Image (tube, rainbow, N blue to C red):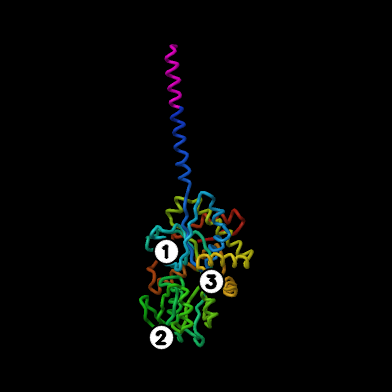
Amino acid sequence: MPRRIYIYRAVLALAVLATALSGCGHSAPATDSAQKVTLRLGYLTRVTHASALVGLDKGLFTKNLGPDVTLDVKPFGQGTEEATALLSGQLDAAYVGPNPAFNAWQKSSGTAIKIISGSATGGTTFVVKPGIQTAQDLRGKTLADPALGGTQDVSLRSWLKDNGLQTKPQGGGDVFIKPTKPESAIIPAFTANQIDGAIESAPYDVQLVKAGGVPLWSDPGTITILVVRQEYLQAHPDVVSGLLKGQVEANDFIHDNPDAAAQSANNTLAGALGKGLDPDVLKASFQETTFTNDPGAASLKDQVQKAVSVGLLDPLKLDGIFDLQPLNEILKGSGKPQVDA
């Protein structure tokens, strides 16, 4: 074979090799970049969101998400604000109350979010002025809650309706309900006799009692759930799994080390609010709240019916709102009971 053919083949081989190496060199950074993910997580600055508070303080989310996931945490004052952030794509996942989640589901025609875990039940009390003993004593009175259409708001309006007292979303009725923002403003309004009672979740209900209020009744239902945007769940199932692992570990820590968990939650609250809770308020708040991975499907369906009955939600079925498979895989892997929708 002529020498020039050998030279041609050698040059061609070198060119092919160079092209291959060049392609590898350009593809590696693109692959690394594709692996970097941000998870924008919302939570409320309440003890009833201690699964999130402890998970953040103890680094449980960060540990389980891994080094390729950036956790961007956003504290909120109201669940209705979280629902808006989820619908507008400003959050990827959130610890939120049931009724804001229902509204997000309904407004998006079932395309926005999935409930992927429970977080807390109870921790919510209707506190009134001394001397108020029955619902009828509230006729003509002014009450407060965190937000119109929030979980506490629905619970209070439903209870009043069951006792023959009507309320109106725009105000008025037999009892006037005043949504109050920020939520902490309810305490001074109570002490200044501007309101006669309020339904609140921990720690604010405990603070109302400390300010001289009397508990009239408590709501044992689901108060906090974990939801994720459907698009995010489909695009990043491994990230969502890491978030759920952190959630399960946070609740384990709360159950096994309640005192340490309370202090851990307080650390996160102090960081978000600039000041933590008094020890007695912190302790009582944890004692009245149950932290669980079970979303409590029966409680959620009951809350939907209540919201519909008081005109704060159109008739709604929860078919398809749950995706508990990722959670149940984690629970099964750690030998824990699985949960049902």
Amino acid type, label 1: Ala
**Residue 8 seen in render:** yes
Q: Nearer the viewer, residue 189 or 232?
A: 189
Question: Where is mark 2, residue-wise?
Answer: 140
Q: Extreme top residue here?
A: 2
Q: Which residues are the magenta region? A: 1-16
Dots 2, 3 in contact, CB < 8 A: no
Considering only order in the chain, which callout, 3 or 2, is on the residue closer to the N terminus? 3
Structural crowding at the residue carrying mark 2, measured as other residues with C-alpha within 10 Å and reported as few (<14), some (14–19) or many (≥20) = few
Considering only order in the chain, which callout, 3 or 1, is on the residue closer to the N terminus? 1
Which label number is shown at residue 83? 1
Instruction: Please tell me whether residue 294 is drawn above or below residue 4 in the rendered image.
Output: below
Residue 52, given in percent of the width and then of the height, sits at 53, 62
Residue sitting at x 42%, y 53%: 231
Amino acid type, label 3: Gly
Residue 303, given in percent of the width and then of the height, sits at 46, 70
Q: Nearer the viewer, residue 103 or 205?
A: 205
Which quadrant of the rendered structure holds the N terminus? top left
Amino acid type, label 2: Gly
Cα–Cα span, label 2 and label 1: 32 Å
Q: Nearer the viewer, residue 316 or 169?
A: 169
Question: Where is mark 3, residue-wise?
Answer: 122
What SS does tag 3 mark? strand
